[in-house]
Amino acid sequence: MFPTRFLSGLLFTVVCGSAAECTVAAGLSGVVLDSLTAAPVEKAKVQLDDGEQVCFTGADGHFAFPVLPAGEWALTVSRMGYKTRTGEHVTVAEAVPRELEIQLLPSAIIIPGQRVTGTRLDYDLFGLPVIVLTGSELLAAGYRDLPQALAAVPGLVVNTGYSTSGTPQVTVRGEAGKRLEFTLDGLSLAEGVRGEVDLSAIPVSAVENIEIHRGGQWGDAALGGSVNINTRRDFSSARAVSFEYGSFDERNISTTISGMAGSNYGYLLTGEIADRNSAYSYVDSLGQDVSRANSEFQIKKIYGKLGGRLAPEWDWGVSGLLHENNRGVPGTILYSTPAAEVKERRRLAGGNLSGVVGERLSVSVRSSLSDFRTLYRDTLSYQSHAQYDEAAYLLDAAVLFSPYENSPLTASAGGEVQHRQLTGQDFIAAQPAFDEASRTAEAVWGQVQVRPPYDLPAWAGSGRLTGGLRYDTDDRTPSYLAPRLGAVWGWGAPRVVNLSGSWGRSFRRPLLTSLFWEDAYTRGNPDLQPEKAREWDVKIEIIPPQTNLIVSTRFFDRSYDGFIEWAAGADWVWSPVNLPRATLVGREDGVSWTAFNQRLRLEFFHTLLWATDEAPGEYQGKFLVERPRHSYQANTRVHSLGFDLHLAARWEDRRYTNKDNTTWLPPYRWFDLTLRRTIPWEMLDPVFTVKCENLTNEAAALRDGYPLPGRAFKVGMELYF
């Protein structure tokens, strides 16, 4: 799967009566837009030929030179990851002011994860809505790690109770871990023994943006959606230090430094240390008061990135991540498993090269090497009982061709190769859990995007259609062909109604550990087959003019063949099995409203999920475990008198804990409150934050036996140099 953007080689035209020349009154201003998506281009550098007149576009794509001497000026527009164009001339004279519109034409729209912005909602190329969070927004909201930030996103649930693996789990429509793909700069992160990725490994300060896709995606491991983390391409000079301390002895300190080394090279370095050492009480599913011990963690991480421009048409980048994580995993009375300690180490190195060949062909290549080690230790005997090591290599490449500028047709194609090798050791049994397991997978894909070649009547609206095909194969499982179709269409100027829809197929290979791992509690299944899914998705969005209101409804239907589920045998050893059929049908409703010049923002989100086992037998028609029927989320954000206030609330319906639906976790409600204040002071501009998580001290668990913490308070401070 290629769930990230490959943007390089931008052409632009100045739309102001003439493509080469226009006049403005004693100044120059305008907006920089993506000509294919109408999205504003942020942080583009706009420079005049004297070298002293420079400005950068804001989040809305606007730039301005308020006062300029009369005469002819040469305009240059550049940004890391884009083709620099020079020599476009603009004449400044005494005349009627006219704002410029600079259209940047991307030479590569490669993958379904590329965003297509119509008005205030983002879509991928196949019509699936995309939630986009920018790193600056996350830092401004006071988030110090990605699991905390994602917990406030409508439609997402993050289990900070760490479940059985010691890793926070992200859940979309009841799908978690194994059915969500997580990528860093477009490259899949190592799958690990349980198919879960610890997002706390990625520093927030290194994030450019996060793209969250709800719904099936192309490629392996993305049946339920994907979370694509793109690291910063902006190397502007910055230095920051942050501190946080809170309940349960939780402490966090992080630092970031970035800048330019010359005009064509930049660097970014960020590090963080966090720990918690605590125990807390909760009420289990049997109504008993239980003390949850061994819930500590300690995290160390450092991330570095270098990037530069080889030529106006070519960019390069290299990055590295080192992450160490020690977590305590509490024992659960449900299955009488002992408490354990998990030690993890992840090392990741990646590189990319992208550029333009000629004027209409763009090429992008990315690769990464990673290794991931996990050690389990029984905290009762302090005996290490299992370890596994995973090494992975990934390489992907893509090209895009557009016949001519502003062409209604764009074609792209690409491929990827990934190799994973896993070695496991059971120390208690003094023998390998498996000697070695490996898998090499290849994929090729192509897609075509079509827009109307001319302006349609107002009643017909405007939009785009996309079709694509992907072929996956590996050395262990059957090959798979996945078609996908999508459309995004809208009416009104500005848009009043947006309609999007998609249909496609997707699949997920079994984890290597699901095939081969064996210890005292689990046993792999070598005969396990891939999951396959068919899905359609339709969404309608209404934006009443001049109301700052957005109302949307989305319907989805996903059918699984070979749905993978873990089941306990007669000896209470758990193994994965394939269910013949399962379905997830539902609806998502959303309302968003802003007022008082963006100082007040209200959001409400509801998910109705009907997830059932459709395999013939005694459980046919029963609800799948741990998937709530109804989920509600609400966010209130207020900015006034220099303060920022954020109240996040969610409520979840009961979740069944067994296949015959006779036991369940009760509904729960959850409130988080954050207050921030910036105090201008000399060169530091400190930002102070106060948080209260689980405001009502709710006793809640997303998985039986692994509850969330009780009420927690945190205070923090950030210093910017």
Image: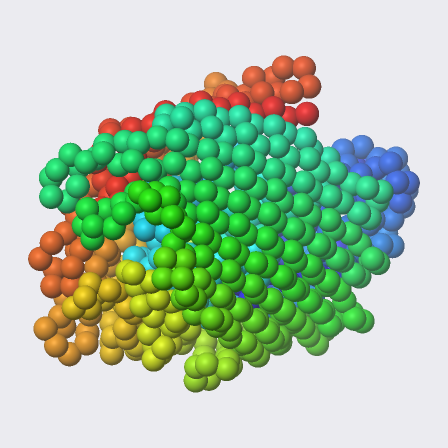
Question: Residue 235 placed where, x, y %?
Answer: 71, 42
Q: Check the image and report above or below for 613 versus 90.
A: below
**652 on left or right of 254:** left
**318 on left or right of 596:** right
Q: Residue drawn 19% across and 76% down?
A: 615
| The quarter of the displayed image where residue 602 is located | top left
Question: Residue 286 placed where, x, y %?
Answer: 11, 43
Q: Residue furthest front?
A: 430
| The quarter of the displayed image where residue 658 is located | bottom left
Q: Residue furthest top?
A: 681
Here the colouring is rainbow
**As rendered, which of 161 and 540 lies closer to the eye?**
161
Number of on-image labels: 0
Q: Check the image and report above or below for 284 versus 101.
A: above
Q: Residue drawn 15% across and 79% down?
A: 616
**281 on left or right of 101:** left
**As rendered, which of 564 and 5 lies closer to the eye?**
564
Q: Check the image and report above or below for 469 versus 710.
A: below
Question: Residue 603 placed where, x, y %?
Answer: 35, 41
Q: Residue drawn 69% across and 59% down?
A: 351
| The quarter of the displayed image where residue 710 is located | top left
Asked whether residue 239 is in view, the answer is yes
**As rendered, which of 682 and 25 lies closer to the eye?**
682
Q: Quadrant of the C terminus?
A: top right
Question: Residue 217 placed where, x, y %?
Answer: 45, 67
Asked whether residue 168 is in view, the answer is no
Q: Residue drawn 61% across and 17% down?
A: 680
